[in-house]
Image (cartoon, rainbow, N blue to C red):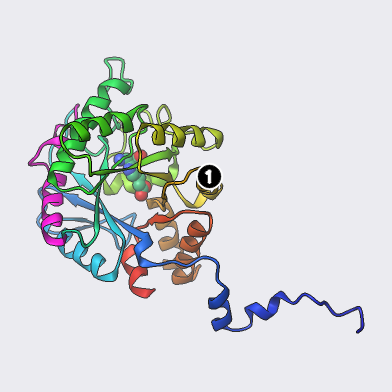
């Protein structure tokens, strides 16, 4: 044999679609995808979001329909965000049994039962008039421990309304323990916690602030969300949350933090979720609308990469569409 020809020929396993499919290491399946949904109080028609083409703020009725479609498509779960008609300093609507998310949770659990996993984002920023994720001190700082009491109460209200999983996203220290304790005391020991353990202070949340009408009225979230420069503290956050009783952990955003997804996956033995956030969605939609990228391929590549990095569960605004296509 002449030495100039290679012996190893990796290209053999790339030759046809069928062989590539056979040897693929990562697969996307509908059951791994979770659809984030916005429901707004006091509107009579769904409102399109300018910065997230294809995503809307739902009325309770359009929410039910879209949730049904997502479940038909096979998505693994839904996560709800509520936008109340009235906001105040303590986010009173967040734990009001008549509040918009509680109503939506009751509707969806009546409609869908156990055919999907109904999750609820648990935070205050959509409900406070100042837009911060917690209560403020008189000096205008987010008061960690006072906020924990609010989160505990919201968790119980969401569980009572039918949430299977609550997902605290406010990055207060001790939030998972406070929520777990409150749920157990109220008789909801079966309600799971998906902790947004690793949540960076990210500019990729820009369009979400339009969707959830929750841009901070002053300052930013850097005093409670993580610095994008840091990786080690993500592991500390995850370990604290597991110690406090988290059942699953999340990394957010996803695309720019795949190294963190991988480190978390290699460190823990619980399901790991990653959230492909509003800015990740908006950038692809914007570029695709210009004809600058192939929309469908970019969507699948981005989701496959998040799974390849180690996420078991991916939250994505494309969940229904992608689930239908798989
Ligand atoms: C806070 C929350 C945010 C997102 C999910 N939960 C916004 C923030 O922290 O400012 C962002 C989601 C997205 O950008 O898609 N309740």
Ligand 1 under 8 Å from disc 1 Cβ: no
Classify the position of the N terminus by image quarter. bottom right
Question: Magenta part of the protein: which range?
Answer: 89-112
Disc 1 element: helix
Q: Horizontal placement of 289 versus 211: left or right?
A: right
Residue 164, percent from left and from top: 22, 49
**Residue lying at 30% horizontally and 31% vertically, measured from the top left:** 132
Q: Quadrant of residue 183?
A: top left
Magenta stretch secondary structure, dominant = helix
Residue 15: % across, % down: 63, 82
| Residue furthest to the left | 98
Residue depicted at x 43% and y 54%: 280
**Left or right, residue 24 beside residue 243:** right
Question: Does residue 75 sit above or below 152 in this rendering?
Answer: below
- Whether residue 237 appears in this view of the structure is yes
Quadrant assignment, res 223:
top left
Whether the magenta-drawn stretch holds residue 109 is answered as: yes
Percent position of residue 61, x then y:
11, 60
**Residue lying furthest top:** 138
Q: Is residue 30 above or below residue 195?
A: below
* Ligand 1 located in image quadrant: top left
Circle 1 residue: 260
């Amino acid at each position: 044999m002449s030495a100039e020809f290679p012996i190893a020929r990796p290209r053999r396993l790339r030759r046809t679609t069928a062989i590539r499919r056979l040897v693929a290491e990562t697969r996307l399946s509908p059951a791994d995808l979770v659809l984030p949904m916005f429901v707004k109080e006091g509107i009579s028609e769904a409102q399109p979001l300018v910065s997230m083409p294809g995503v809307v703020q739902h009325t309770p009725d359009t929410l039910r329909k879209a949730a049904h479609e997502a479940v038909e498509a096979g998505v693994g779960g839904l996560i709800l965000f509520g936008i109340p008609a009235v906001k105040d300093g303590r986010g009173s609507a967040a734990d009001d049994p008549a509040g918009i998310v509680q109503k939506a949770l009751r509707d969806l659990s009546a409609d869908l039962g156990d055919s999907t996993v109904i999750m609820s984002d648990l935070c205050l920023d959509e409900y406070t008039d100042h837009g911060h994720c917690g209560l403020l001190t008189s000096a205008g700082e987010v008061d960690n421990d006072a906020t924990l009491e609010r989160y505990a109460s919201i968790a119980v209200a969401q569980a009572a309304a039918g949430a299977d999983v609550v997902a605290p996203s406010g990055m207060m220290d001790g939030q998972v323990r406070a929520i777990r304790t409150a749920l157990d005391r109220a008789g909801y020991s079966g309600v799971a916690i998906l902790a947004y353990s690793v949540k960076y202070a990210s500019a990729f949340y820009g369009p979400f602030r339009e969707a959830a009408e929750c841009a901070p009225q002053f300052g930013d979230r850097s005093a409670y969300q993580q610095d994008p420069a840091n990786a080690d503290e993500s592991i500390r956050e995850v370990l604290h949350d597991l110690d406090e009783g988290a059942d699953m952990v999340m990394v957010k955003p996803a695309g720019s933090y795949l190294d963190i997804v991988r480190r978390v996956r290699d460190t823990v033995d619980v399901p790991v979720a990653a959230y492909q956030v509003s800015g990740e969605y908006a950038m692809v939609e914007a570029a695709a609308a210009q004809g600058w990228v192939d929309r469908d391929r970019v969507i699948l590549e981005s989701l496959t990469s998040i799974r390849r990095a180690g996420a078991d569960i991916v939250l994505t605004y494309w969940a229904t569409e992608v689930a239908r296509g798989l």
